[in-house]
Image (spheres, coloured by chain):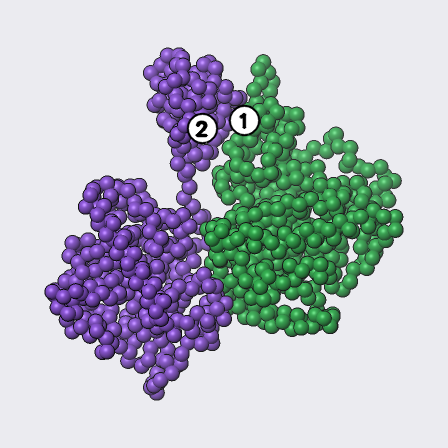
């Protein structure tokens, strides 16, 4: 579903859009002389002007993961998504589609919906009760004595929204990047068997990490640090990201086990017709993606200490619990794990240059009953712990980036996906600034 | 039989998603005609008399006895359950001997039912049954009994049915039931027998497997004599055999029935191939003292329940059938966490992934004024009009005519209800109606779910009856 932009974004009255020429030249140079294979210079993580450029060039231009359909299953259900200066309303409309509206009242600019999620009929601004239809049209504003007030000129601004395989994406650009269609074609067949439309939210966690959004993403794109995730290491092979010849001695046994699990998973995938091959186009396309289905350690079913299922209800029409994890990375702000028994979505929403909201959502089959089919504590334990550990890692890096002693360091071979993320980011910003 | 050669591939049938027992909707329906069919829903054991109407010899020294209830009622049960039968083995004037037998017929054909009895020449009862029970024989029965049965609704009906010897009886009931129902299912049957000629129901199983693509049936001969022409599996149950017949056993619900040794082996092997404990259901056809005691307790409990129900029916049949019985733990469908027997139906959907889902809206019942809340009869009454609105928080009764808008009248009487558009758009005047009927003419300010939860917009509503309002 694609929403049309009914009010063109107006550049009048915007001060931040143009930096002083000198500063812009400085920033452009930082991008230009970025040392390939090395982490970014400190201002990328600490400077407000670069953050503003990120908001404009990355979050203002690309498809951003906003929520899953399980978060707004019924007409009138909505979530609000905030990043940088933006606040969007993502609303399930009566036709089953998704409306994306700027959460800015056209009267005096108040936030129209103040809750993170909920259900509404029309949208009423709490300030002067301007009332908008779910499509964003202004349908009521008390106007005693006004004669020239034309309601049709003051609808909520709209942005693009689309839903693929149960994931909802938004885009603020007038003309969104067209290659998202191709990316959607890549991941749709991997996700479809998990049938996200028949899931429900078991738990959602919002954490604010004291770190630049790029550090959050970088941290997620490698498992070099996975020794720091003891709970996750029970089920996720810590050899993730390594290839033959890069295996340290202490991981050789794990590597062999991984290889066996991989062979057995491939056999299962072939039997059920599930795609599992690695597709890796992280920086070779605008809507960058990596997706694959990979084995889990232990019983190979889920993110538990012994690898056994955490919810007893299989998702969709999946025939088997031992399906490892189908993992997807999407540029710029999301990653996902699709398992036989549950799904975890991760969205990163930048707040400012040194803070980011990380939203983690656990989905289970919509007929799974808490306490009967799953234990919420057990379901969420591994990734709750892992997220806290990751938060600490990200914050250590943010602190470092603020130190005069910081200088970019080399990404290791196993961190090639971090490099791909940074390369993608640098390219996209440069294209935008050009 | 004439073999018809055909070159044309026939497409698979289109089915609704999941499996649902026909009584499900009957039990949950508020509609009177549907409620009339409630006797078809399996909700308690009863004591009844049944007349044998047919005997069918089966392979493996088994005999099927088909019965109908003497009172003409259908026998309501779940596929997999059993009946306890009193056999006058020592003559009509002596104390009868009770035995439990699994029902082998399908509860979707409830007007007659059958048990299938294997003759154990050393036994006291089964040879007597084989020799003496004939069409016309009337026996006293108690049933249905047992927690080993198919669920009432299953969105992912993927089963592995394991049977050894006479253990095929309840499994046959399950097979017949699933075969008789539409809906997606995937059933693998693995049937162990001791000799090639001893597989009861094998012709019907072969027929079902040949016409119903949801079924795969495998036979295995134990480790004794295997004739040369045998084309089935060989040997006792092993993990390799499970992997061979159901490599996706991990994602299936497993129902297993047979002698104790067989079932113990099965438990171990199923765990080995990754089937979760909570996905394994078993019925023991022989067992240690403990197992036997458990079955005795099950039958004893069923007897108590049946007697209790009989008394209640005798007291006031009408009242009794009006209300649903309280839940009997033993007979609850395993998945039903609420402990009610009124299992909610699966949303009706076609198994076409393109088709939009249509989950039935879950209506929360309208709220009733709570006991202990203020009594509206003590409130002051103001205004004029033919109907009365009681505002429970404000503590006032306001008279209103059916033509007037509720908000206006209420506000005039001093009830504080915030409002803005007064056209049913903004929803700011939304309040909860505790009782009574209104006519509402809103413009999107309220959602169907809110309405079914008892809310309404007084700005665009008129009163149809006296009202009690939470404001």
Residue A131 vs residue B81: left or right?
right
Chain on which label 2 sits: B
Report the chain shown in purple.
Answer: B
Residue A170, compared with residue B454, is above or below; it is: below
Residue B432: image tag: 2
Would you name the residue on which mark 1 appears? Answer: A139
Give the camera-side residue of A317 and A169. A317
**Nearer to us: label 2 or label 1:** 2
Residue A38 falls left or right of residue B155: right
The quarter holding residue A241 reads bottom right
Vertical order, A111 against B391 (above or below): below
* Residue A384 position within the rendered picture, expressed as x and y whole percent measured from the top left: 63, 52
- Label 1: which secondary element: strand
User: Label 1 neighbourhood size at 10 Å, few (<14), some (14-19), many (20+)?
Assistant: some
Q: Name the residue at the bottom extreme.
A: B228
On the rendered structure, is B307 left or right of A228? left
Question: How much space separates mark 2 and mark 1, taking CA atoms?
Answer: 25 Å
Q: Check chain identity for marks 2 and 1: say if they share one.
A: no
Chain A image colour: green
Query: SS of the residue at dot 2?
Result: strand
Residue displayed at 55% across by 44% down: A71
Can residue B151 be seen here? yes
Can you give x and y, in whole percent of width and height, for residue B171 in the image?
33, 66
Kindly indicate whether the residue at mark 1 contacts the one at mark 2 (C-beta within 8 angstroms).
Answer: no
Q: Quadrant of residue A87?
A: top right
* Whether residue B190 can be seen here: no
Given the image, what chain letter belongs to the residue carrying mark 1?
A
């Amino acid at each position: 579903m694609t929403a049309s932009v009914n009010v063109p974004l107006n550049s009048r009255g915007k001060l931040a859009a143009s930096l002083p020429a000198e500063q812009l030249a400085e920033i452009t140079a930082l991008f230009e002389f970025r040392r390939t294979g090395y982490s970014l210079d400190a201002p990328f993580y600490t400077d407000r002007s670069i953050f503003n450029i990120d908001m404009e060039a990355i979050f203002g231009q690309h498809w951003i993961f906003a929520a899953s359909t399980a978060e707004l299953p019924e007409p009138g259900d909505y979530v609000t998504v905030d990043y940088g200066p933006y606040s969007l309303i993502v609303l399930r409309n009566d036709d089953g589609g998704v409306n994306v509206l700027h959460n800015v009242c056209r009267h005096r600019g108040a936030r129209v919906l103040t809750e993170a999620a909920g259900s509404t009929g029309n949208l009423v601004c709490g300030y002067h009760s301007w009332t908008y239809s779910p499509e964003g049209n202004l349908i009521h504003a008390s106007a005693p004595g006004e004669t020239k007030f034309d309601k049709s000129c003051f609808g909520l601004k709209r942005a693009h929204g689309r839903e693929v395989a149960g994931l909802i994406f938004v885009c603020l650009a007038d003309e969104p990047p067209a290659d998202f269609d191709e990316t959607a074609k890549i991941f749709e067949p991997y996700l479809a068997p998990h049938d996200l439309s028949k899931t429900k939210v078991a738990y959602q966690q919002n954490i604010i990490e004291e770190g630049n959004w790029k550090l959050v993403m970088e941290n997620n794109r490698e498992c070099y640090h996975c020794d720091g995730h003891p709970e996750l290491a029970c089920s996720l092979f810590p050899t993730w990201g390594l290839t033959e010849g890069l295996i340290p001695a202490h991981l050789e046994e794990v590597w062999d086990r991984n290889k066996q699990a991989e062979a057995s998973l491939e056999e299962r995938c072939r039997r059920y017709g599930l795609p599992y091959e690695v597709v890796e186009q992280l920086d070779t396309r605008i809507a960058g993606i990596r997706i694959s289905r990979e084995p889990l350690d232990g019983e190979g079913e889920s993110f538990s200490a012994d690898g056994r299922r955490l919810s007893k209800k299989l998702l969709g029409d999946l025939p088997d619990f031992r399906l490892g994890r189908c993992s997807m990375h999407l540029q710029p702000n999301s990653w996902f794990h699709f398992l036989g028994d549950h799904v975890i979505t991760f969205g990163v929403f930048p707040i400012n240059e040194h803070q980011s909201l990380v939203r983690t959502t656990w989905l289970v089959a919509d007929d799974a009953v808490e306490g009967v089919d799953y234990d919420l504590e057990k379901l969420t334990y591994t990734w709750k712990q892992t997220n806290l550990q990751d938060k600490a890692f990200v914050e250590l890096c943010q602190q470092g980036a603020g130190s005069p002693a910081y200088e970019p360091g080399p990404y290791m071979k196993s961190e090639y996906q971090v490099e791909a993320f940074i390369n993608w980011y640098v390219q996209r910003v440069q294209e935008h600034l050009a | 039989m004439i073999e018809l050669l055909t070159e044309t591939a026939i497409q698979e049938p289109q089915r609704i998603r999941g499996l649902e027992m026909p009584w499900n909707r009957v039990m949950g329906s508020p509609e009177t005609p549907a409620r009339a069919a409630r006797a078809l829903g399996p909700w308690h054991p009863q004591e009844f008399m049944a007349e044998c109407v047919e005997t069918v010899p089966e392979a493996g020294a088994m005999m099927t006895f088909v019965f109908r209830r003497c009172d003409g009622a259908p026998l309501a049960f779940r596929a997999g359950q059993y009946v306890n039968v009193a056999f006058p083995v020592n003559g009509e004037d002596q104390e009868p001997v009770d035995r439990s037998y699994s029902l082998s017929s399908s509860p979707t054909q409830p007007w007659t039912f059958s048990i299938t009895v294997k003759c154990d020449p050393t036994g006291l009862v089964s040879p007597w049954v084989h020799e003496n029970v004939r069409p016309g024989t009337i026996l006293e029965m108690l049933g249905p009994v047992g927690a080993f049965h198919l669920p009432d609704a299953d969105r992912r009906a993927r089963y592995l049915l394991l049977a050894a010897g006479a253990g095929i009886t309840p499994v046959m009931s399950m097979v017949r039931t699933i075969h008789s129902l539409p809906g997606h299912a995937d059933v693998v049957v693995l049937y162990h027998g001791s000799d090639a000629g001893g597989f009861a129901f094998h012709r019907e199983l072969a027929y079902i497997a040949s016409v119903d693509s949801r079924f795969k049936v495998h036979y295995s001969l134990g480790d004794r004599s295997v004739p040369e022409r045998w084309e089935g599996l060989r040997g006792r149950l092993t993990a390799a055999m499970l992997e061979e017949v159901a490599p996706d056993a991990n994602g299936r619900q497993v129902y297993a029935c047979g002698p104790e040794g067989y079932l113990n082996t099965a438990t171990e092997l199923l765990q080995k191939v990754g089937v979760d404990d909570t996905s394994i259901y078993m019925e023991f056809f022989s067992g240690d003292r403990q197992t036997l005691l458990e079955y005795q307790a099950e039958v004893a409990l069923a007897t108590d329940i049946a007697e209790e129900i009989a008394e209640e029916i005798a007291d006031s049949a009408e009242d009794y059938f009006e209300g649903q019985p309280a839940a009997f733990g033993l007979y609850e469908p395993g998945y039903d966490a609420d402990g009610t027997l009124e299992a909610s139906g699966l949303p009706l959907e076609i198994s076409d992934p393109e088709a939009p889902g249509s989950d039935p809206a879950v209506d929360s019942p309208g709220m009733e004024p709570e006991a202990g809340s203020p009594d509206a009869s003590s409130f002051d009454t103001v205004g004029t009009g033919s109907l009365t609105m009681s505002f429970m928080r404000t503590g006032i009764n306001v008279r209103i005519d059916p033509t007037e808008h509720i908000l206006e009248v209420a506000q005039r009487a001093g009830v504080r209800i915030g409002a803005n558009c007064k056209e049913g758009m903004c929803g700011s005047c939304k309040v909860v109606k505790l009782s009574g009927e209104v006519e509402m003419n809103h413009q999107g300010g309220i959602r169907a779910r809110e309405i079914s939860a008892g809310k309404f917009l007084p700005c665009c509503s008129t009163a149809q009856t006296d009202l009690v309002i939470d404001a």
